[in-house]
Amino acid sequence: MKVVVTTPTGHVGSRVVRLLLQAGLRPTLLLRDPARLDPDTRQRVDLVTGDQGDPAAVQRATAGADALYWVDPPTDADDPVAGSARMGAAAAAEVRANGVPRVVFQSSVGAEKRVGVGQIDGLARTEELLEGTGADVLHLRCGYFMTNLAYDLDQLRAGVLSTTMPTDRPLPWVDPRDVGDVAVANLLSPGWSGRRVLAVHGPADLSFAQVAAVVGEVTGWPVQARQIGDDELRAGLRAVGMSERQVEGFVLMSAGLREGFTPEDPRTLLTTTPTTLRSWAAEHLPPLLGPAPAHRPAPAELPT
């Protein structure tokens, strides 16, 4: 069985690769920089070097494939929605040309809205493109990745977890490794066909206030959630050099989910995965944050 994996060094992709190897397969990996793979993995896989936006590279990787795990990778395009759709178009064209029978696509909660959710709109477009190929397609609508906390280390050390969402609004939080587990189960399972949507919601919906409390308890760094406005977020993103379209793509991901949004696939036994935020944070955040302060004063009172 030939299974093709994109973004194989990412949080989810690396898990997908490991599980396929443990299942006795030799997956084909499409990536730009093979040097990012550890030597033990490199000798157990087939490599195709190239960009996912390059149809020729995607064609080489998917020739003779039985299944494809597709992720629209981050792009530095001025218009992130168009950049994501470009990747999706390359996938769809080669799935059709090579007759790939099965695709599992890493999408996001919010893609069901189709428009108005910033960068997620690009994933929605990829969903539509893949559905037009005639292949069996499963869209994994993932919740908020726990690993996003690792991008806010300076804020966490300062005792703040900022968000444009209301701090008491529950959201599905998921460990990317669990997304990989669900992906591989469906790549290898003969038990489904057609067009499917499966949410990956983690074990529980958590508000940012609850997340801040858990992070503080397991790391020793006192943290408090703080809601900021969209304009404050825009200013911060512009300050790091993002273009206006990139800024809006980022801001609207949260803005588009704040009011009146209900996931197409609700929380059920099938959409709930096991890894708790507490166990993930205890494993990953202390080494990243460093030693906790000797004294643990309560965080300063912050506006909400």
Image: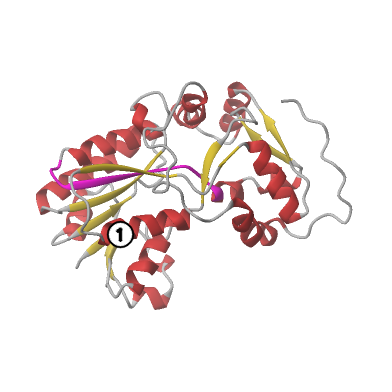
Rendered position, 119 above or below 198: above
Residue 58 in percent (x, y) is at: 22, 53
Specify the quadrant that holds the C terminus.
top right
| Figure disc tally | 1
Q: In this view, does 187 lie to the left or right of 227?
A: left
Left or right side of 160 for 7:
left
* Residue 86: x %, y % from top left: 27, 39
Q: How is the image coloured?
A: secondary structure
- Is 137 included in the stretch rendered in magenta? yes
Please name the residue shown 51% across and 33% down the image.
242
- Read off the residue under disc 1: 5
Q: 65 or 151, which is in the foreground?
A: 65
Type of amino acid at the residue the image marks with label 1: Val
Residue 66 highlighted magenta (yes or no): no
What secondary structure is found at the residue carrying circle 1? Answer: strand
- In the rendered image, which quarter contains the N terminus? bottom left
Point 70% across, 55% down: residue? 289
Q: Quadrant of residue 297?
A: top right
- Quarter location, residue 159: top right
Q: Residues within 10 Å of mark 1 (few under 14, many from 20)?
A: many
When the figure is inspected, residue 8 is found, relative to residue 252, above or below; the finding is below
On screen, 304 above or below 8? above
Left or right, residue 297 beside residue 84: right
Residue ID at (36%, 31%)? 121
The magenta-colored residue range is 133-146
Q: Where is residue 301 in the image (x, y as percent from the top left)?
A: 82, 31
Magenta highlight: main SS: strand
Residue at 22%, 45% in the rendered image: 90
